[in-house]
Image (cartoon, helix red, strand yellow):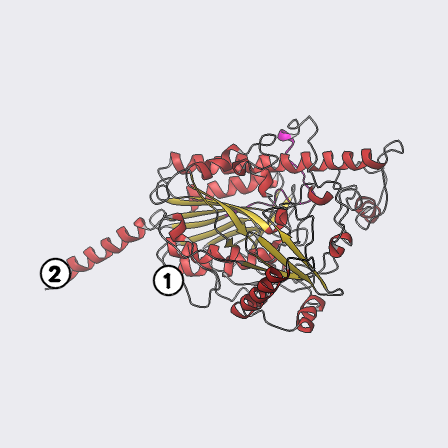
Amino acid sequence: MKTTIKLLLCVLISFAAHAQKKKPNIVFIMSDDHAVSAVSAYNDWLAALAPTPNIDRIADEGMLMHATYNTNSICGPSRAAILTGKYSHVNGFFKNEKGGDFDASQQTFPKLLQKAGYQTAVIGKWHLGTSPTGFDYSKVMVNHGGQGTYYNTVFVENGTKTVEETTRHSTAQVAHDALKWLDEKRDKNKPFMLMYQFKAPHRPWTPNPKFNNLYTEDFPHHETFNDDYEGRLAASKNMLEIENHMNRKDLKVPAPEGLTKRQLGRYQRYGNNGEFWTPHDSLQGAALKNWKYQRYIKDYLRCVAGVDEAVGQMLDYLKANGLDENTIVVYTSDQGFYLGEHGWFDKRWMYEPSFRMPFMVKYPKKIKAGTQNKELLLNIDFAPTLLDLAGVSIPKDIQGESFKRQLYGKRYKARDAVYYHYYEYPFWHKVQPHYGVSTGKYKLIHYYYDMDEWELFDLENDKNEIQNLYDKPGYEKITLTLKQKIKSLQKQYKDDMSLEEMRAMTDVVVKRVYSEHNN
């Protein structure tokens, strides 16, 4: 009898181990501020000039999603939404500046995967203040207010050990650490979920010197480069213009010798608030604006080249080690970014370049290579989708929706609109708090903090969002329909608070502790 029981236990253990091995591995790759226009798989306006062949491999071997949007276009809040599958006002992390730290005790998809038997790891940029939870291994950037730096990056490993890496560019360091964890540190008898996350191409766009010879020819300007913001009051009051709000550090202007640390900081930050400067007096006007743009766009795209190389290293490792077929690989960014559209850099707005995110996923066992999808998706959908792909139950309180059926080419119910809400003001870039809705055909935005302005765009006939059609004859019906949709989605997502309550969220001051430093 005892022998029979032992044999049965062995069979059950073996069956459980086999089932675990059958679960797909997940590599979730995320860069910071990577614009859709700078991913050549999308064949956008920069595609031919700045190819990303390794990132494109994920799209070529899987599915490219064309209409993926974020719920709050700023680094920390987007990351919190991705982890929780919930809007900013629900997960509690709604702004970077004076909004406190991420509540690490709450439910996240890594915790749910870990509970389901996955070995989990996060390596690279975190930017949420509190130490990562739900991970068997973590090594995350903590210096420069949690942003990390491109060189001499300081990491905290497993919440306790501080490590300063001095030999590699941050992108190369994250790639090195991720491959080392896969090769040497993980339990190879368990399925794994690795969050592989880069600082690049975030400001101040400092590339690895190995890419400095890329892009010697000047880039063209986007057709909205000289936008005058007519009919868009909020846009006219911005502080993210390439012409007027880039500083000397952004554009790698050498500082005079002999400055103290404080003097150096002031010198490098000069320009943030619209202070005029030029590298030499003969450079003025349109020529100065173009000089700034060329310095910016080239360094940005050189940073992207470093990320593309690191993505290629990961894909090559998975294939060489027999992990390719049973591993889901995602590539995305925490939001989009302006590469001269509207004359801007940075993000925050509900306009397409910052609202829209790159997203592609491959899973050779299940997703047909070379497929594409144009349905509306949100970053809060990532968590339930990854759980669904892993065969893990999706908690009812997650606000996002799984798009596994889209990935598998099965029948699905498409979303008819996406809802957005941005809170942070005025620091850093004086972008007015706003919420809005987009159906893919029309977009309605309401700016509500210290102005009451609406914008309506016909996205099919005005892809650059130049013509504000709000209050224009002939658009009354669509405006009313979209306002009703906003109310419906606000109720659905529990964002149906008063404008006074929304403004109070912008005004709240909770210092970020960055508790990684205190562990």
Q: Quadrant of residue 426?
A: bottom right
In this picture, residue 28 sits left or right of residue 46: left
The residue closer to the viewer here, 284 or 325, is 284
Which part of the image, by quadrant, shows the C terminus? Answer: bottom right
Residue named by callout 2: 4
- The percent position of residue 340, horizontal first and vertical second, equals 70, 41
- The percent position of residue 362, horizontal first and vertical second, equals 42, 42
Q: Which kind of residue does numbered mark 2 sit on?
A: Thr
Residue at 20% x, 59% y is 9
Residue named by callout 1: 393
The residue closer to the viewer here, 385 or 37, is 37
Position of residue 56 relative to residue 94, above or below, is above
Q: What crowding class fits label 2: few (fewer than 14 Cα within 10 Å), some (14-19), or many (20 or more)? A: few
Q: What crowding class fits label 1: few (fewer than 14 Cα within 10 Å), some (14-19), or many (20 or more)? A: few
Q: What range of the chain is rendered magenta?
A: 196-211
Which part of the image, by quadrant, shows the N terminus? Answer: bottom left
Position of residue 134 relative to residue 288, above or below, is below
Position of residue 399 relative to residue 167, above or below, is below
Q: Nearer the viewer, mark 2 or mark 1?
A: 1
Q: CA distance from mark 2 to mark 1?
A: 34 Å
Q: Which kind of residue does numbered mark 1 sit on?
A: Ser
